[in-house]
Image (spheres, rainbow, N blue to C red):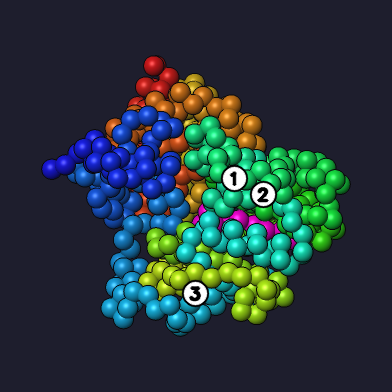
Amino acid sequence: MTSNNAEFERAKRVLVGGVNSAVRAFRAVGGTPRFIARAEGAYMWDVEGERYVDYVGSWGPMIVGHNHPQVLERVRAAAADGLSFGAPNVMETDLAERICALFPQVERVRFTSSGTEAAMSALRLARGFTGRDKIVKFEGCYHGTADSLLVKAGSGALAFGTPSSAGVPGDLARHTLVASFNDLASVQALFDAHGEDIACVMIEPLPGNMNLIKPAPGFLQGLRTLCTQHGALLIFDEVMSGFRVALGGAQQVVGVTPDLSAFGKVIGGGMPVGAIGGPADVMERMAPLGPVYQAGTLSGNPIAMSAGIATLELISAPGFFQDLEARCARLIDGLNRIAADRGVAFCAQHVGGMCGMYFLETPPDSYGAVMQQDVERFKRFFHAMLDGGIYLPPSPVEAFFFSSAHGDAEIDLTLEQADRAMRQAVAA
């Protein structure tokens, strides 16, 4: 049998840093990444045969758990007919119809192969539609790795202490204006100074890449008003929150309607998928109907579409999100109770099946607040949980994810280990 250490050393000889996405390298927490051999339901097994209750869920897509039989059956049936055609297929239309039905303002959809590609394309569409160059994003919000969006970004960039990336031209970055999440005045100031040049405001309505942050009352409504007043588009990046916090995404939860939405993760059921959705008059500025070019060889491939259709069927079942919410609340309440009993500065919260934990007295409301948490204590807690068979995101700035496969047994196991891990995190 091989080992995680051996596989990491092997990977580092041919993969940059031994990984294909920076946060997987465990640099934010130290130690050796676990190399996963298989997954089923709420569990993953590494190459050493160790089993973990998984709260990463492929960073969100696995809302019905790993290898759900209905999803696998649909994927196998589609694969038997061909992996990719590079031509239209009916599964694209089927999945797009489901998205349009759940989001009334979404009249047209364009599929991509990743959330990064969806966000990048939504940005280009907004610029093409408005004829403006500048965009507004928020400190700590992560929208993938497009150059214009890697300015004070979240996710791995925060964990590595490099909120901006090398290789992003200064001339391009100057078109990206950065505001503070939950600070409407900071956005107002940008519109006061650059209103006629701002094409869009792009935001994670429920950020998950500087850990889970909830929007303050009136904040997102204020963004909607400012965009309408100044003729800019409001773009919700729901790659993470879409179909995860509610069937209608974060916009259903917060009651605010964006002009464009970027989707991903859950709509692929574990396969690489992204999508842009919005009103016909905006979306039809895209090629082949309009001048904004966007294309992708594997966009809308039948395997990804089939996995997404099966997943949306499952989460559309009556009571799915109510049950998910109730069981997730039991986990979060248990974590908070353990911390209180131990006298630890710790808190956790959730929206639907999207969760955050912080070594802070109260949940943070901004990037700055997130960065005040006790990172060293988080590292100790993370490794104690991992050693006890609980797989959490290897970074203090990432949300974690609950699935319908997490039952009472998994919650009990997690809370038992959290009690031990909390003691170890404090004692060190």
Instruction: Judge from the rendering whether residue 363 lies leftward or rightward of residue 323; answer left or right.
Output: right
How far is the residue under mark 3 from the one under mark 2? 35 Å
Q: Residue at x 49, y 21 (%)?
A: 343
Residue 156 image offset from top left, x and y in percent = 49, 40
Task: Categorize mark 3 by other alpha carbons within 10 Å: few (<14), some (14-19), many (20+).
Answer: many
What kind of residue is marked 1? Val
Q: Residue at x 77, y 64 (%)?
A: 131
- Callout 2 secondary element: helix
Q: Read off the residue under disc 1.
A: 168
- Indicate which label's residue lies in the foreground, 1 or 3: 1
* Magenta-tinted stretch: 233-245
User: Compared to 382, does 63 lie above or below?
Assistant: below
Q: Residue at x 62, y 43 (%)?
A: 151
Q: Quadrant of residue 290?
A: bottom right
Residue 375 image offset from top left, x and y in percent = 49, 26
Residue 44 image offset from top left, x and y in percent = 29, 48
The label number, if any, that marks residue 95 in the structure image: 3
The question of residue 246 being in magenta is answered with: no
* Mark found first going from the N terminus, 1 or 3: 3
User: Compared to 375, does 264 lie above or below?
Assistant: below
Q: Residue at x 65, y 40 (%)?
A: 139
Q: Are marks 3 and 2 in contact (CB under 8 Å)?
A: no
How far is the residue under mark 1 from the one under mark 2? 7 Å
Q: Are marks 1 and 2 in contact (CB under 8 Å)?
A: yes
Between residues 55 and 122, which one lies in front from this camera angle? Answer: 122
How far is the residue under mark 1 from the one under mark 3? 35 Å
What kind of residue is marked 3? Leu
- Indicate which label's residue lies in the foreground, 3 or 2: 2
